Image (cartoon, rainbow, N blue to C red):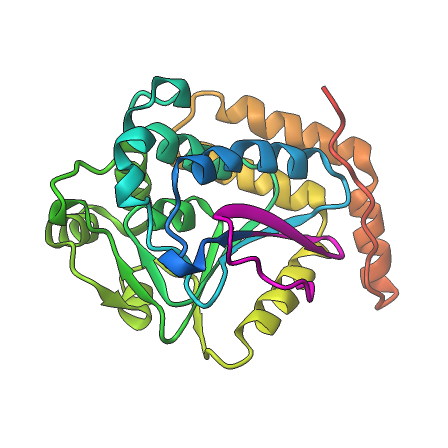
Amino acid sequence: MTGAAEDTTTAALRVEQSGAVATIVIDNPRRRNALNKDMWQQFAPLLDGLAADPGVKVVVVRGAGGNFSAGADIGDLKAILNDPDSGAHDGGHVTAGENALANFPKPTIAAIEGYCIGGAWQIAGACDIRIATQTATFGITPAKVGIVYPLSGIERLVQIAGPATAKYLLLTGDFITATEAHDLGLLSKVVPENGFRDEIQDFADRLATRSQLSTQAMKQIIDAITATDPALPAISGYWQHQMAASGEPETGIRAFLAKETPVFSWIKPVE
């Protein structure tokens, strides 16, 4: 992570970059990083830029000031959920931001400290890998304020954790610990709070050394399997063709035999 000071005066998303890893920081620490309408709207253009940047191989999402996010800003909720300009008929700007993250072609990591509440779970759930500190707290709380959670968020929660867990979390709105979230299948890993950001950076750096062809292909294929996408055979065929033309297997095999670290060079062609 960069050493830039965190701005506590303006609620916004900002991007930090370290090597091939870009970090989207949810920056509204005075409100536990609650996201207003403007912040939700920033996800899509930020992610479009990072997707187009060949120097970015992995994206991390985290919160400023020790919390991931308290979710959608309640004071701005009507504008967030009901704005027709969001492009999402269900869940408004929350769903639009979530979908932008879920559809991002490169690997994504949610780095979760402190609170991950309400709509913040939609951000975390849209990431490929979720890693939290032992002291993180989770809650999906629409039932506490009379809201029906957006369809995309419910679908993704069911896909990740199953219908029984989804019902437990959504119907109760109860807070759970990171250990409980891991046991329920919401998290990939729970780690100590001390040194958390360094561990996230090390993990992301390691992920960035993997073949971009392999990681992007398998991410898209897994998502297609999960969605029972009828285009799955065509998607798989596309990536098999890319692999055959890329030279990536030769690079990997040559490095393996020489006991060296491979340096992969594939960049997805513009189509």
Residue 3 lies in the magenta-colored region: yes
Residue in view at x 24 percent, y 48 percent: 162
Q: Is residue 92 left or right of residue 25?
A: left
Nearest to the observer: residue 80 or residue 61? 80
**Quarter of image, res 184:** bottom left
Q: Position of residue 121 (x, y in %)?
A: 34, 50
Q: Determine the residue positioned at 42% across, 67% down.
A: 113
Which quadrant of the rendered structure holds the N terminus? bottom right
Q: Judge whether residue 91 can be spotted in this image.
A: no
Query: Does 172 lie within the magenta span?
Result: no
Q: Position of residue 2 (x, y in %)?
A: 69, 63
Q: Is residue 244 visible?
A: yes
Out of 70 and 96, give the one closest to the viewer. Answer: 70
Q: Quadrant of residue 17?
A: bottom right
Q: Does residue 87 lie above or below 253 as drawn?
A: above
Between residue 40 and residue 121, name the one nearer to us: 40
> What is the residue that sits farthest to the front in this orientation?
9
Residue 188, horizontal then vertical, whole percent: 43, 62
Magenta stretch, residue numbers? 1-24
Q: Position of residue 250 (x, y in %)?
A: 84, 47
User: In the figure, is residue 160 to the left or right of 208?
Assistant: left
For residue 36, above or below residue 69: above
